Image (tube, helix red, strand yellow):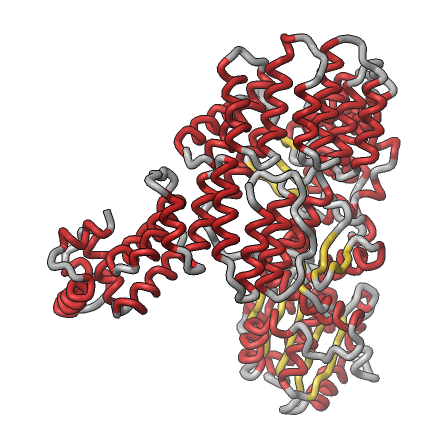
Amino acid sequence: MNPVAELALRRCPTADATTGRRWRQPQLDYALGRIRTRGVLVTGEPGVGRTWFARALAELTGAEVHWVVATESSRSMPFGALAGLLEDLHPVAVLKELRRRLGPRSLLVVDDAHLLDEASATTLLALAVGGSARMLVTAQLTGPVPDAVLALVKDGFLDMMPLQPFGRDDTAGALAEGLGGEIAPRTADLLWRWSRGNGRHLTELVQRGLMDGTLTRTGDVWMWRGDTDVPPVAAAQPITGLSAEGVEALCALVLAEPVTVDVLCRTASPEGFAEIEERGLVDGAAGTVRLSHPMLAAAAAPFLTPLRRRRLVDRLLAVDPGRPHLLLDSGVTDPAQFVAAARTVLLDQPKLAVQLAERALSLDPGPHAALVLADAHAECGSPGSAWQAYHLASQRVRDDDDRLAVVLTQASLTIWCDRKPLAAVDLLEKAPLPERFHADLESAAAVATLFSARPAEALTRAEKVLAGAPSRTAWGRATLVSAAALVMADRPREAAEAMAALTSATDISPYYRGLARSVAGLLGPDGDMPSLARLREALVVQNAGRGAFRSEVIANLAVAEAAAGLPASEKPDEVAVLPALATWVAAASATARQEPAAALYLAAAREAADAGSLRCMVYYLAAAAEQGAAAEAVHALGDRSFEAPETRARAIGICARASRSASDLLAAAEAYRAAGMPLEAAKFAELTERRHGLTRRELEVVRHAAAGKTDRAIAETLVVSVRTVESHLAAAYRKLAISSRQELAGLFA
């Protein structure tokens, strides 16, 4: 049974036998065609679904099906696999009896033919040579296979069809069908990454997730809420047959991957590495190796006893000390190492950061272990534990440097845990610390101001810090704020310079670089509205950590829910980068209800302008213009000029909606197209066609002509005649009230 069918039957007893077929339909169609002529050998890795495929295919043939299933135990006896089909297994009688039983409407299905004994395999080949029956055979070709089975394909009696694992998209679709609900995109991607599309692994992962509650349903969307670092141990198939050296090498690889061959061989042994390589447990490139399948880490867990883990960790750290996750199993007692390691993994592996910080806590007399523990708990979405660690740190202050670190963490927790960025600003402004810490406090206040949706004020604070000689940490915070605020102010070139400086600074926390990129990403060109499943999953992610962009996700989710006729799940809170989110949600909800919304969009634009975000202002004005307030939107634009292509395109579109002239609408469509916003470009192309009678072909010809192409070049591009191009251009000139290419080019200037 394939994972779709198995999961469907477990959750829905009425699911019929065709469940899951559509995910293998192309392969089923191909194999069905071959079965009707001679036969097929279905191959594939263990767990890929060969047996289910054979059953589904056999049912589709409508034939009288005879099953032979080979096993490890049947291989030890001559004709053992045929014992379930024939009563008399005498060598002389077997072939004759099979030919008698298999008529013209018969289909012989042999499952796991790689486990056939030699006598059964030879009999199978003899049947094929004599053309006595149509055959459907499944086999795994990665290990020993009887020569007679290989001869079935090599000598042309059967066509071979490799059955591949599910791809990413098919995994999501198969899971959705099997579980009876939409799968959150991150969850589908995680399960595919762990299983690599292998049906057996996929089914075991889902069953384990359902059993222990890590795979749960939120509304109508399934999400994985458990550990995402390694697959559940119970879902893995055991590994057998390795020598002691092979087990040692496999365990070292589990602990250290990715790792160089040199480090692995020095930690375990060359012989052990050679063994796991021969078993196909290793993938590698350029001298670096890792496990060939993510599930192998879970499968190797029983071998990693505490004693073996400690021994291998000590060896690995002696050879390659830069592995933070190994410190927990080592004999290291220096708290500074644990604190540094915790900060290194804080963003990517906050749970590991918690463990490292907790190990350092009893070893560190100062506040730093407790402070990184507070940050790690905040990153894990545990505000109570974060504040508890902070209070412990505040009791360990020894000097002004410690006091600064404690105040900065208090401000951080006030923003991310209490969701009160303005209170954090007030706290930082009143902190009783020496003047030498002013840049550190002011840069932190700039971050808090940015995340209270006041980019202009945040930029002013950041510029004051950067005008002095701040510490590197203060410089990093101020540059982060500068890059983000400049993007929002529609100053992309200056923003790019700040981002480049931040990215190239290797001594600055990657957290600041990632945060700046995320802010910039919020204001990129429009694409399709994310699905409800993706937005709900994004909200789960934001609720589970610091939630830097929780309000933005909630706002987008509310807009998508309104469009779907659903009530809003949540409301944005005080932590936000983009201004006027609540007003925007109200406007979009009114639009979805087909109520007047232009005034709300104009109000959102005023809020954004007051906050200093021209990008958001123009976005809201474009929505107002689309709702019929184009003249008011043009007035709000004033005589401003815009630098970013997306902002400029929206401004051109606003003016085009106000003028309604064909030339302006056409220019807006081209501006949106050049800015990488095809959905908006299509809207304006449709407006041009609807209001001025330009056909889509005329629009295509006009766009190419405005770009400077000759009539002949346009004809070649569109695969039409030159005369057709000339005819379309003449019609377009008439409708646009122009008479030359020069005037046409001016429309797109």
Identify the image quadrant of residue 349.
top right
Q: Is residue 279 left or right of residue 495?
A: right
- Which of the two residues, 274 or 603, is positioned nearer the viewer here? 603
- Which of the two residues, 92 or 672, is positioned nearer the viewer here? 672
Q: In the image, what residue occupies the spot 79% across and 56% down?
A: 209
The picture places residue 198, in percent across and down from the top left corner, at 67, 59
> Is any part of residue 203 visible from this angle?
yes
Q: Is residue 743 left or right of residue 549?
A: left
Identify the image quadrant of residue 592.
bottom right
Q: In the image, what residue occupies the spot 81% across and 30% down?
A: 387
Q: How many marks?
A: 0
| On screen, residue 628 above or below 384 | below
Identify the image quadrant of residue 386.
top right
The picture places residue 270, in percent across and down from the top left corner, at 69, 32
Q: Quadrant of the N terminus?
A: bottom right
The picture places residue 594, in percent across and down from the top left corner, at 53, 66
| On screen, residue 441 above or below 707 | above
Q: In the image, what residue occupies the spot 61% across and 69% down?
A: 23
Q: Is residue 253 left or right of residue 129?
A: right
> Is any part of residue 510 visible from this angle?
no
The picture places residue 655, in percent across and down from the top left corner, at 33, 52
- Which of the two residues, 513 or 592, is positioned nearer the viewer here? 592
Q: In the image, what residue occupies the spot 54% across and 71% down?
A: 155
